[in-house]
Image (spheres, rainbow, N blue to C red):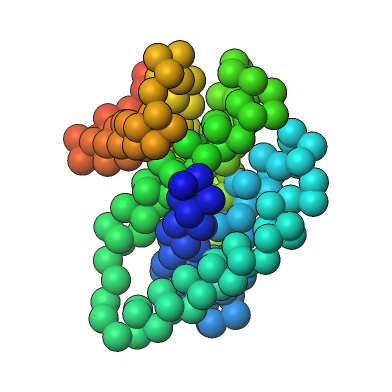
Amino acid sequence: MIYWLDLFGVAVFACSGALAAGQRRMDLFGVVVLAFVTAVGGGTLRDLVIGDTPVFWVRDPVYVWVALAAGVLTFIAAHVRHVSNETLVIADAIGLAVFTVIGTRIGMEHAGPGVIAAMTGVISGVAGGIIRDVLVNRVPLVLRREIYASAALLGAITLQVLDTFELQTSTSALATGTLVLGLRLAALRWHLHLPSFPKRS
C-alpha cells in the first residue's frame, strides 16, 4: 500500500509542478522539468538526510516515468480546458498529505519513532513545493503565513501517536492523511494561520 500511495503522491505533486509551470507560461520542456523536481524533490532530500542511497527514484525508475507522464498529461489537459488556480492548490494539498505520511513512515523505519521521523515527514511533504516555488520565482508556501509545514508536522506526530495504539497501517495512514489534507484545505478556506510578528511602524 505504501508503494502505491507513494506513486500516487508523485503523480499529484507532478501535476502541481506542471500547473505552476503553466502559470508562468513555460514550454513543454519547462513543464516536464518542474513536474519532475516537484514530484521527487522532497523524497530525494529525505533519502539523502537519512542516508538511504541511491535515492528512491534511482532505485526504481517507475517513479521517473510516473512523474513525467503526469506532467505531460497535465500539459495536454490544460490545452483541452482551462485549469483554475484552485486545482493547483488542491493538488498541492493532496501531495502534502500523502508525502507527509510516506516520509514519516520511512523515517520511523530507519530511525524509529521520534523527532527524526517527524522531520523526515515534514521534509518529504514540503521540500518539493519549496523547489517548485523557487523555480517559478515565488515565495515558497512554507515561508508564508499560511498553515502548511505546520500541518505536515502535526500529521507526522499524529501518525506516530496512532501507531502506539497498534492500529492497522492503512488505518493510521488514512487518518493522518485526512487530517493533514483537511487542515490545509480548512486553512485555505477560512484563511487560518499561525501567530506572526506584529506590524511595527
The image position of residue 101, as x and y in percent, is 47, 36
Residue nearest the observer in this picture, 167 or 21: 167
Residue nearest the observer in this picture, 199 or 57: 57
Residue found at the far left of this picture: 190
Q: Residue at x 40, y 83 (%)?
A: 76
Q: Quadrant of the C terminus?
A: top left
Position of 155 relative to 132 (above/below): above
Q: Is residue 138 visible?
A: no
Q: Residue at x 67, y 40 (%)?
A: 46
The image position of residue 160, as x and y in percent, is 48, 20
Position of 170 relative to 132 (above/below): above
The image position of residue 32, as x and y in percent, is 57, 74
Residue nearest the observer in this picture, 78 or 176: 176
The image position of residue 143, as x and y in percent, is 50, 36
Q: Residue at x 40, y 14 (%)?
A: 165
Q: Residue at x 64, y 20 (%)?
A: 112
Position of 196 relative to 4 (above/below): above
Would you identify the image quadrant in which residue 39 lies?
bottom right
Q: Is residue 15 visible?
A: yes
What is the tally of numbered marks visible in this picture?
Answer: 0
